């Protein structure tokens, strides 16, 4: 599959974006949402990831996010994150559109990262709207802003709209570029529409996922492999002076 993948990357001539989901961070030890060991198998989203859940029990929601922050902050980027950063640096990839709230793309060196579902390393004040960057989980939950109001994780919860600017940017990138879809079950809309949008606009779709997804049918190349494992041998090739 490596030669086929590299050939498609060559053919795209820099006109590619990546769309990533929880699966790209699985090899860094961050649990995915769906599947056997997925978070939504153990926890109920409606109790932890909705505005209603937060209004009812902010402490419980914050404890869960503090636990997830801990996992993210102690995780390290894996070869899949690193490969995307190398590709961007070498002009082979325009942007990473991610559904992930972790910061592993940035920590791997990616610069143009579009977070469709917000970021776990930020919190937002419910009163004044101030956004505060965090490098470790808050010691006291729920944290309180300087203005006296409660802070919430700066992520998108079920039932909430995606950030408008990010979604518009993602849609327009998928109109003009091929899409490398990595580690998403591709069932949560509107993000799940992006590969279809790319395809309808005449672009290629490449998928890296150990499982079959709704994207598999429209993919020009579908690699049935864990992302970290697939990209590991590719790192030196993508770095090579001669490539592409
Ligand atoms: P999911 O948990 O739904 O799907 C993870 C995907 O990653 C599955 O298709 C797995 O087969 C695949 N996978 C697992 N291990 C992998 C590996 N090592 N390498 C590559 N792929 C692997 O995660 P998302 O599609 O990101 O939304 O979920 C989408 C949204 O649903 C999330 O952003 C979150 C969730 O509810 C919000 O929080 C709003």
Image (cartoon, helix red, strand yellow):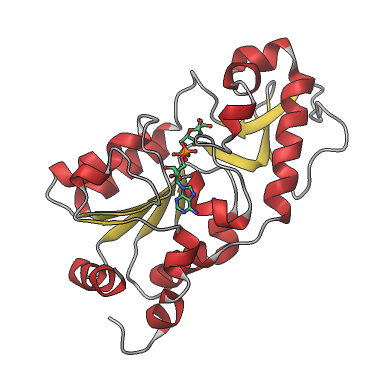
Left or right of residue 196, residue 73 in this image: right
* Snapshot quadrant of residue 177: bottom left
Quadrant containing the C terminus is bottom left
**Does the image show residue 195?**
yes
Q: Position of residue 63 (x, y in %)?
A: 78, 29
Residue at x-position 12% and y-position 50%: 202
Quadrant containing the N terminus is bottom left
Residue at the extreme right = 140
Task: In the rendered view, tell whether residue 92 sits above or below residue 236.
Answer: above
Residue at x-position 76% and y-position 22%: 60
Left or right of residue 115, residue 169 in this image: left
Residue at x-position 40% and y-position 68%: 88
Q: Position of residue 138 (x, y in %)?
A: 82, 38
Q: Position of residue 100 (x, y in %)?
A: 52, 44
Task: In the rendered view, tell whether residue 129 sits above or below residue 202.
Answer: above
Residue at x-position 55% and y-position 51%: 26
In this view of the protein, which residue sits in the foreground, 219 or 41? 41
């Amino acid at each position: 599959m490596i030669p086929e993948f590299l050939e498609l990357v060559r053919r795209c001539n820099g006109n590619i974006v990546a769309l990533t989901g929880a699966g790209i961070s699985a090899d860094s030890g961050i649990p995915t949402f769906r599947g056997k060991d997925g978070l939504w198998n153990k926890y109920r989203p409606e109790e932890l990831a909705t505005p209603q859940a937060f209004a009812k029990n902010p402490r419980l929601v914050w404890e869960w996010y503090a636990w997830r922050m801990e996992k993210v902050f102690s995780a390290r980027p894996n070869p899949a994150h690193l490969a995307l950063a190398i590709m961007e640096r070498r002009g082979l990839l325009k942007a990473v559109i991610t559904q992930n709230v972790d910061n592993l793309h940035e920590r791997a060196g990616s610069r143009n990262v579009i977070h469709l579902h917000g970021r776990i390393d930020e919190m937002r004040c419910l009163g004044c709207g101030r956004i505060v960057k965090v490098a470790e989980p808050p010691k006291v939950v729920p944290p309180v802003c300087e203005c006296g109001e409660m802070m919430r994780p700066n992520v998108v919860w079920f039932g909430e709209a995606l950030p408008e600017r990010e979604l518009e940017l993602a849609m327009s990138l998928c109109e003009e570029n091929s899409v490398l879809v990595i580690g998403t079950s591709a069932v949560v809309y509107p993000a799940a529409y992006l590969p279809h949008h790319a395809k309808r606009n005449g672009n290629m779709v490449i998928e890296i996922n150990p499982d079959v997804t709704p994207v598999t049918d429209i993919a020009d190349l579908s690699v049935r492999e864990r992302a970290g494992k697939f990209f590991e041998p590719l790192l030196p090739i993508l770095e090579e002076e001669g490539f592409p």
